[in-house]
Image: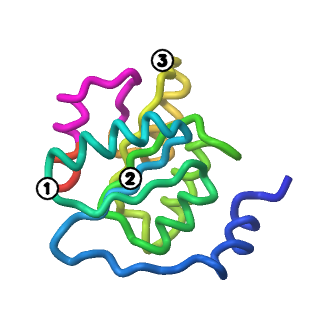
Amino acid sequence: MLPLSNLLALTEANAMTTVPNDHNPVLLVVEDSADQRMLIREFVSDLFPCELREAPDGLTAMVEARGCRPNLVLLDLHIPPHGGLQVLQELRADASLAQVPVIVLSGSRFPEDLATIEAAGSSRFIEKPYDLDELESAIFSMLS
């Protein structure tokens, strides 16, 4: 299996870069469940105007992040092919994305997972199933 960085190199040449709207924040939702992406899309669109980008896997997430330069990433921890932790590490290793706030969403309650996520540079952790008020508060605090 190729490392995520090698897969990115193969796909970025074909990725279209978009210029984000200067007036509205850009949110990147990285979630393999189409139902969860739809829930977040509908929830966020009711909160405020923004450009919402979506990625169902880590490879697409990095291509999208490099193309749209999001203001915030909502990242599921358990996504293919290598997991959200690797995406978080790659975001933090990329100088142009290192400061982007990342809210990790996961059903994991294991202390070692939480410690690893924190050490990798997550801005916030929200446990699934997440409370929508908590998610709203986290989004607003990360964007302000």
Residue at (35, 81) in percent of width and height: 19
Q: Position of residue 97 (x, y in %)?
A: 43, 67
User: What residue type is disc 3 on?
Assistant: Arg
Q: Is residue 45 magenta?
A: no
Q: Which mark is residue 73?
A: 2
Task: Verify whether residue 131 appears in magenta.
Answer: yes
Amino acid on which disc 2 is placed: Val
Image quadrant in which the C terminus is located: bottom left
Q: Nearer the viewer, mark 2 or mark 3?
A: 2
Question: Residue beneath label 1, please?
Answer: 144
Q: Assess whether mark 3 and mark 1 are in contact (beta carbons under 8 angstroms).
A: no
Q: Quadrant of residue 13?
A: bottom right
Q: Which residues are magenta?
A: 125-138
Label 2 sits on a secondary structure element that is: strand
Residue type beneath disc 1: Ser
Q: Which mark is residue 109?
A: 3
Q: CA distance from mark 1 to mark 3?
A: 28 Å
User: Which element carries disc 3, helix, strand or loop?
Assistant: loop
Per the image, label 1 sits on a secondary structure element best described as loop
At 55% across and 24% down in the image, what residue appears?
A: 112
